[in-house]
Image: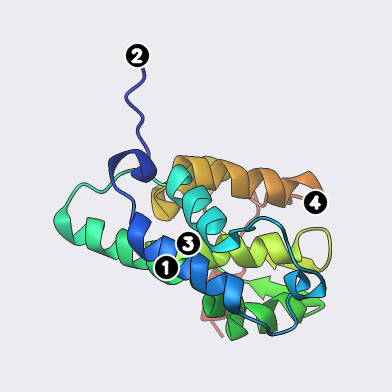
Amino acid sequence: MNNDKRFIEESFPVKEVSIESAHEKKIRHGHISTLHIWWARRPLASSRATNYAALIPPPKTADEWNKKRNFIIEFSKWENSLNELIKKLASYDCLVIDELGYAEVEPVQVGLFFTLMHKRHKKKTTIITSNLGFQQWSSFLKNDHLTAALIDRLTENSHVINMRKCISLRPKFDHT
């Protein structure tokens, strides 16, 4: 039996996400749902939150639990689905992300990165450089399922250039 549980199976902020989902129904900022009256609720907030919680592993510590729980609550808020930074980065014709995996990232940043890549997928050019191979990405993204989905999306319509056997020019420039 596989013991690979997800956050949603261990803990999920149902009350908080439900409040945001109900609040989302009342928002009238040019959202598609304002074009006509729905006979049933279409809870995008709870869909975003439950999809994310189904992808991430359960927390190992109380601090990690609080961070993931708070992120899910914030992620379910309507105003955060329209994050200004994500909208700005998603609009660039060409976005270069240099040295992916170089720095440690928080779960919130992983979620935002996945959202950004989703918004740019098959629409805009994205160049990503990394010293890590795809098999090492889950070590810094800390989520095997999200990493697999991200790599699948990134490689579906792309050119991967492996420069493993290239010789660095740095030693040649250091002597001048």
Disc 2 residue type (three-letter): Met
**Cβ atoms under marks 4 and 3 closer than 8 Å:** no
Element at badge 3?
Answer: helix
Does residue 131 appear anywhere in the picture?
Answer: no
Q: CA distance from mark 2 to mark 1?
A: 36 Å
**In the image as oriented, which residue stretches furthest toward the top?**
1
Q: Give the mark nearest the N terminus, 4 or 2.
A: 2
Mark 2 sits on what residue?
Answer: 1
Q: Residues within 10 Å of mark 3 (few under 14, many from 20)?
A: some
Q: Is residue 162 above or below residue 130?
A: above
Mark 4 sits on what residue?
Answer: 159
Answer with left or right where residue 129 lies relative to residue 19. right
Q: How many numbered markers are drawn?
A: 4
Q: Residues within 10 Å of mark 1 (few under 14, many from 20)?
A: some
Quadrant housing the N terminus:
top left
Q: CA distance from mark 4 to mark 3?
A: 23 Å
Answer with left or right where residue 33 lies relative to residue 25. right
Q: Residue at x 52, y 79 (%)?
A: 174
Indicate which label's residue lies in the foreground, 4 or 2: 2
Q: Residues within 10 Å of mark 2 (few under 14, many from 20)?
A: few
